Image: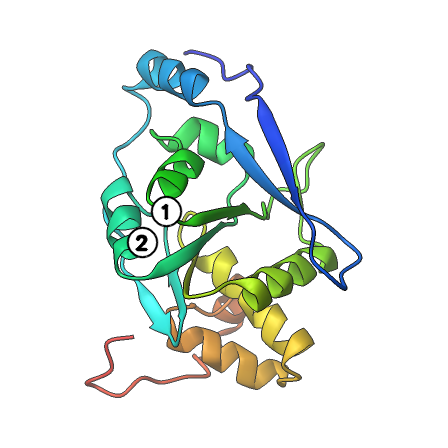
Amino acid sequence: MPSFTRVLPIALITLGVTGCSFDITVHEYDHHWDKEHKQEHETEIAEIEPPTIHREGRLMFSAQPDEDTIYELAEAGTTTVINFRRESEMEERVPFDEAQVVTDAGASYVHIPLGGGVGDEPGYDPEDVDRLATVLENAKGDVLLHCASGGRARTIWTAYLIKYEDMSEEDAIERAQRVGQQPSALDRLLGKPHSYTPPADDEG
């Protein structure tokens, strides 16, 4: 089986934000290498299906979007796409250059990788919530937040609601569940129900 040992070149673009003490890093992937990577491993990377989109106001949450969905959302007014997947996930499981597609669609691409926490992989850090807050504060128009399934995107948004909107943990969790968040693995193991029970006609 082929080994994914090549390191994807990354160009870092620092976005300066007035009044903030940290930088947001936007990762732009080398399109030529991605194309070569896809050709070499096209039998191992599954095609991305259009995801279910959950919306609250100008924020949208989804699993990994396909190329058509990105273009459709941009045409409908989405100005920013925030990806919370790790670089290794994108290299191994997404058959297109998301940063390039988002840029070509006329939107801004922001990468805040979450999860893993092994070796050089990112984990879950308070600074990630601060980066999200800065992006949301400065974004104009609709914003799509996604990861592989949407769970990490909604989890960091829950933390944002608690930290930046002074919401109680219980209320923040319920709000996240309104846009598709499932109970945590711990809650499921303990048999805790959803905080939010949607009515019969609620489509999420």
Quarter of the image with the C terminus is bottom left
Q: Is residue 6 visible?
A: yes
Residue at 48% in and 81% down:
174
Residue 37's quadrant in the figure?
top left
Residue at 31% in and 53% down:
74
Give above or below for 187 relative to 7: below
Q: Are marks 2 and 1 in contact (CB under 8 Å)?
A: yes
Residue picked out by circle 1: 106
- Amino acid type, residue under disc 1 in the picture: Gly
Residue at 39% in and 62% down:
61
Residue picked out by circle 2: 74
Give above or below for 4 relative to 130: above
**Mark 2 or 1, nearer chain start:** 2
Q: Is residue 186 visible?
A: no
Q: CA distance from mark 2 to mark 1?
A: 7 Å
Give above or below for 146 relative to 12: below
- Amino acid type, residue under disc 2 in the picture: Ala
